[in-house]
Image (tube, helix red, strand yellow):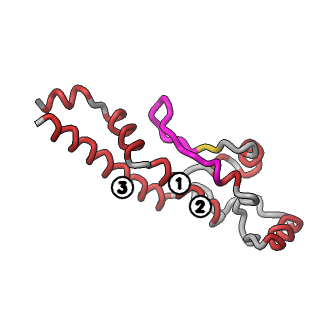
Amino acid sequence: MLTDVRDKMTLDQVMRVAFEQAKIDELITGYNVAQLWSGETAQATPIQPYYTPRTKRIKRGKGQPYDRVTLKDTGAFHASIYSYVDGRNDIVIDAKDSKKGKLVTKYTAEIFGLKPNNMERFRLVLLNAMRDHVLHRILQVQ
């Protein structure tokens, strides 16, 4: 009986189902946007280069933070960030906004990704979701 479950589930399949059912994409996106808002890369280092004096004046005038790079002006870039499981079963963070290319060129791809403490939180959520999925499948067989 349990061999039927084992033979029909791979680790990659379990991860994909858990990713979708537990809405992991929303969690990852939320962590990434929060990091950007706090001015940090996936390496937990400040986003650089820093804003120019001109940009700081503009930010100050809009009532936005200017003491750190947040990559937020209108909010369109932040709102376009999403995550997915690719064909190699890697979890990828990306953005749909047209400014993505320019921002990656200027600030590096490290603007996408989770810093260590957020990565640990994410792993726990994903592992729990995977465990729940496997247990559900096993209980369905019995």
Q: Are there few (<14), some (14-19), or many (20+) residues within 10 Å of tag 1?
A: many
Q: Position of residue 84 (x, y in %)?
A: 51, 40
Q: Which mark is residue 103?
A: none
Residue at image location 38% in from the left, 49% down from the top: 22
Residue 25, compared with residue 17, is above or below; it is below
In this view, 98 is above or below 89: below
Label 1 sits on a secondary structure element that is: loop
Q: Which residue is mark 1?
A: 114
Q: Earlier in the sequence, mark 1 or mark 2?
A: 2
Foreground residue among 116 and 131:
131
Residue 48 appears in the rendering: no
Q: Residues within 10 Å of mark 2 (few under 14, many from 20)?
A: many
Kind of residue at badge 3: Leu
Q: Please name the residue that numbered disc 2 is placed on.
A: 35
The answer to whether residue 97 of the structure is visible from this angle is yes
Residues in magenta? Answer: 79-93
Asked where in the image residue 70 lies, by quadrant, the reply is: bottom right
Query: Considering the image in quadrants, where does the N terminus appear?
Result: top left
Q: CA distance from mark 2 to mark 3?
A: 19 Å
The amino acid marked with disc number 2 is Gln
Label 1–label 2 contact, CB within 8 A: yes
Residue at x 74% of width, y 49% of height: 103
Residue at left offset 24%, top offset 41%: 134
Q: Which residue is mark 3?
A: 124
> Mark 2: which secondary structure?
helix
Type of amino acid at the residue the image marks with label 1: Leu
The spot of residue 56 in percent (x, y) is 83, 69
Crowd tier of the residue under label 3, counting other residues whose Cα lies within 10 Å: few below 14, some 14–19, many 20 or above: few
- Judged from the image, the secondary structure of the residue bearing numbered disc 3 is helix
Seen in the picture, residue 117 relative to 13 is either above or below; the reply is: below
Rendered image quadrant of residue 105: top right
Is residue 21 magenta-colored?
no
